[in-house]
Amino acid sequence: MAASETHVGQQARNGFGVAALVLGILSIVGFFLSWIALILGVLAIVFGVLGRKRAQNREATNGGMATAGLVMGVVGVVIFAILLAIGISIFASSSSSSTNGLARTAVAATLTP
């Protein structure tokens, strides 16, 4: 039996691989939608793992598609994590600088007669 064939009499169950690929693509393309991209990336990872298991058990014929979806899901989650870290650092630096400015203004106001 060739690697691309399923068990005799069974139809290939390729849904997980297709879902992983589509969700992985959407998680990378839609990274600017923040939380939605994270959810899509996690779902792509889950479906990619399930699709790869089906391909290894010869229940599906699209192991490569499942792997591609898995990889793209991981990339989408990593992009989300990087953008989240950048956003947090920008927010933290801007809020700390404005707080320091307010503190200096308050100290200067109390010291001036």
Image (cartoon, rainbow, N blue to C red):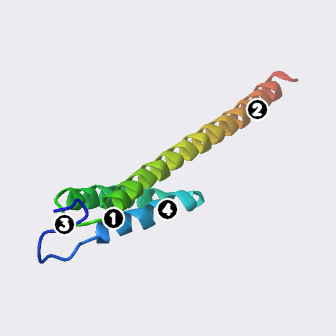
Would residue 30 appear left or right of 8 to someone viewing this image? right
Q: Which mark is residue 101?
A: 2
Q: Secondary structure at mark 4?
A: helix
N-terminal-most mark, 1 or 3: 1
Alpha-carbon distance for marks 4 and 3?
A: 24 Å
Residue type pointed to by label 1:
Gly
- Percent from the top left, x then y, of residue 84? 55, 46
Alpha-carbon distance for marks 3 and 2?
A: 64 Å
Q: Which mark is residue 17?
A: 1
Residue type pointed to by label 2:
Gly
Q: Are marks 2 and 1 in contact (CB under 8 Å)?
A: no
Quadrant hosting residue 108: top right
N-terminal-most mark, 4 or 3: 4
Up-down relation of residue 105 to residue 87 (above or below): above
Task: Specify few, some or many for label 1: CA neighbours under 10 Å numbering under 14, 14-19, or 20 or more.
Answer: many
Q: Are marks 2 and 4 in contact (CB under 8 Å)?
A: no
Up-down relation of residue 43 to residue 99 (above or below): below
Residue picked out by circle 3: 59
Residue picked out by circle 4: 25
Alpha-carbon distance for marks 2 and 1?
A: 54 Å
- Percent from the top left, x then y, of residue 24? 45, 60
N-terminal-most mark, 2 or 4: 4
Task: Specify few, some or many for label 3: CA neighbours under 10 Å numbering under 14, 14-19, or 20 or more.
Answer: many
Q: Secondary structure at mark 2?
A: helix
Q: Name the residue at the left extreme.
A: 8
Nearest the viewer among 76 and 51 is 51
Identify the residue shown where x is 28% and y is 55%: 49
Q: Which mark is residue 56?
A: none
Residue 42 visible (yes or no): no
